[in-house]
Image: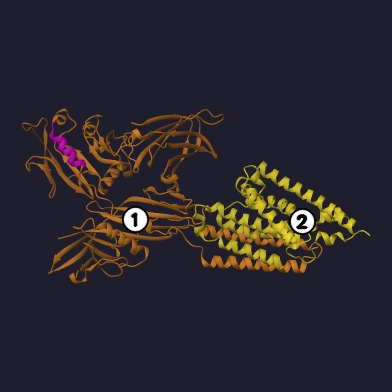
Amino acid sequence: MSLVLLTAGPVVGAPSIELEAELGLGGWVVPGRFAPLRVEIVATSEVRGVLEVIVPGAGGGSITHTHALQLGAGTRQQIAFDVTVVDPRRPVTLLVRSDGETIARRELAFGAARAAEGVVVALTPERAGLEFLAAAGGRRRAAYLGETTLPSRWQSYDAADLVVLHGVPLRALLPAQQEALSGWVAQGGRLLVIASAGLPVPAWLDPLLPARVSSTVVRVPGIPVALARLIPEAGAGITGGADLPRAVRGRFGRGVVEIWAFDPFSAGGRAWPERLRLWLALLSTPRPEPAAPPALADELPKTRPLPGSVQVILAALSIAYIVTVRVVLRRWGTRRAGWLLVPLVAGAFATALYAFASGARGAARAIAQVSVMEALPGAQRARVTTFVSFITPYGGSVTARLPPDGAVRLLGEGRLILDEGAHAVTGSARSGMAALQITQIVDLDLRASVVDAEEALHLVLSGSGPPPLDGVLYRRRQIYRLGPGRLLPRTTLDAARWVALDRPGVLGIDLTARASELLLARLEDRPEEMWLVGRFPEERTALRLPGGGVGESSQIIALPVSLP
Amino acid sequence: MALVTVYLSVLAILALLSLPPDLGRLDDLRQEGLLLAFLVAATVFAVYLTTATACGEIAIEGEKAVVDLAASPFPPDVVARGKVLTSTVFAMLLLLLATPFSVIVAGIRGESLLAVWRAALVTVPVAAALGGTVALAGAVFDSDFARSFVHWLLLLALMVGAGALPPPWNLLSPVRMVIVAVRDGLRVEVGLAALLYALLSVAAAAAIARRVARIRLTFQP
């Protein structure tokens, strides 16, 4: 547990502030992945200001998370962030600012010793039971959390390899904690539920479980721990006998949920060698990569040329200035006090040209974004990965409004300022382009399946979500164009219309087409699956500029298709 | 008039050529380097034009050489002050006329206008001093070749040669003075270098006055 008590130094006239900060899951951080940061501020007198958390990024960049502070005398405020630590040797800086001045500053140094390759999170009343991780080698670490410290945002679990629910009243979890865990599992997380006889399953957990737990407890000779009787759901994977499974595994979205019939944290469970095989098998279960390829960020424009009209106007103003100077010097240059016209002319044109050039600089700033909404089967959710480029060809910064609950990651060099309260991000980069990745979990009720009926195959869309536009089917490097416009609920498929996706540009050359091709190339890793890919205008996922615009934007949905 | 037109046209082209956004991402330039590069170019151009007109390399209508003014009824010190003052005012005029193009670059790159002001502030004493010096050379050397040789030698020695000196002596280079003034502000060393040039202009004026007196003595019947 990384609990750091940071007390501000004495500053004359400034309120005394205590900063307590806890970083990571159980104090462990996986470089490059989100880590929860909880900051508690206690003030002895009233404070109105901003808390800034500065996290160094790669290539000299940084992300500054900000949140408004409003404390009365003797009160405390707790604020949670999710930060990405790239280099654990570089400290995270906490600042409290009020009225433009820094009234408290401390650095949160945790060092490489707190870095891990992965974290196994156990929600358990006792801080024991995961000692096998140290014996198994590698740098996977254990984090024991309670219901008050379990994260309430899905991105806080980013560093977790596995979450174990054991012996804690799950109904006590807050709705945000429930949704965070469900959302993380749906994206590809691994969840282990330890069954106990008569386990009260809360409503939020029930859809995730691959088996029901009966109230029967069985003692088997040779097994030092009691087994609860599990009743697997249809299609679930079983370990052990079908009549008395040791473990039952199922899927929720892209994630794995396993329920064990025994308690590996009990004395008997820890003494049973079979448990190690189950632990390692679960931890080695492959986790699917997101469908959105990181290369999408490279497809975004990195600069914007100055519009031709602006260049023409500047040239015209320059010529007008030269002509005016000539006229003034020729007609009034030799007259008494005629020289006064020279600074007047120079000043007037300088004002006009500066104003125009400054305006052009501001107008050159832009954003470009491409979103991939990957439906998570069976979870009624989708993972939306948005790659954004903040284009500032002449320097300066761009501010945009973030979609709700988006987890922001800086790609490459650049500086980001995240206002966690206002859901706004400001980006700048010396190179003129800052790239970031935003990941969200959104509700999506849309399913696609191929059914065999009436001697033909039909693509059927169901659910309340709007159908995609300009969709294509993809399987094994072949595409089937479903035609322009919105897809119909039922489309008959013609086997002769499949064509090979064998060269770039088959889908077109605009941003949507290039992004779709990259996405389909990524899906080649899943040859057994069929995907429906199309345009999907989605209000909930786009970054918006202050004026409401979205810049150059492309939104694509990738929907797995159930096959007969 | 043609001189001013050419001067402004060159600066306009330089300013418009600095518009492409890709220039700001070159490692050697970055955003702040483009304004600096423009101001250095404008400074060198203004100093050259000031000194070239002062020594007669570029003929200006109404501008007379020191030798010609020696035949005028004006006292030698008036002639000398006039030559140095002419160079000063001409340099100020050129820098004032360049301002709209400097602010284009400053505006598009988001740079402070104070940088433009600081560059002009250090350029004026340099141009005045060098203008007075080459005017003196025009009075000392009869040959056009010798006059041009001294002119260009002086410019190269100061613009390029002085820049190779170890600090703080490299601030004698007008280019180096502008770079430091734009990047770091009006530091004491920059002020001292400008003061040195101001003293040089006073010395050049005194030398011109003495030269005019000697010429008049030579041709006095």
Q: Secondary structure at mark 2?
A: helix
Q: Residue at x 62, y 54 (%)?
A: B40
Q: Which amino acid type is marked by label 1?
A: Ala
Which corner quadrant holds the C terminus of chain A?
Answer: bottom left
> Which of B77/A183 is in front?
B77
Figure colour of chain B: yellow
| Residue B118 lies within the magenta run | no
Q: Residue at x 75, y 48 (%)?
A: B198
Which corner quadrant holds the N terminus of chain A?
Answer: top left
Figure colour of chain A: orange
> Which quadrant would residue A177 be assigned to in this image?
top left
Q: As drawn, is B28 to the left or to the right of A146?
A: right
Segment colored magenta: A272-283
Q: Is residue B156 visible in the rendered structure shown here?
A: yes
Q: Position of residue A434 (x, y in %)?
A: 44, 52
Q: Secondary structure at mark 1?
A: loop
Q: Residue at x 72, y 51 (%)?
A: B125
Return the chain for callout 2.
B
Q: Check disc 2 and report the residue beneath it.
A: B137
Q: As drawn, is B137 to the left or to the right of A249?
A: right
> Which quadrant would residue A499 be assigned to in this image?
bottom left
Q: Which amino acid type is marked by label 2?
A: Ala
Q: Which of the colour schemes (rainbow, by chain, secondary structure, one colour) is used?
A: by chain
Q: Check disc 1 and report the residue beneath it.
A: A295
Q: Position of residue A69 (x, y in %)?
A: 47, 38
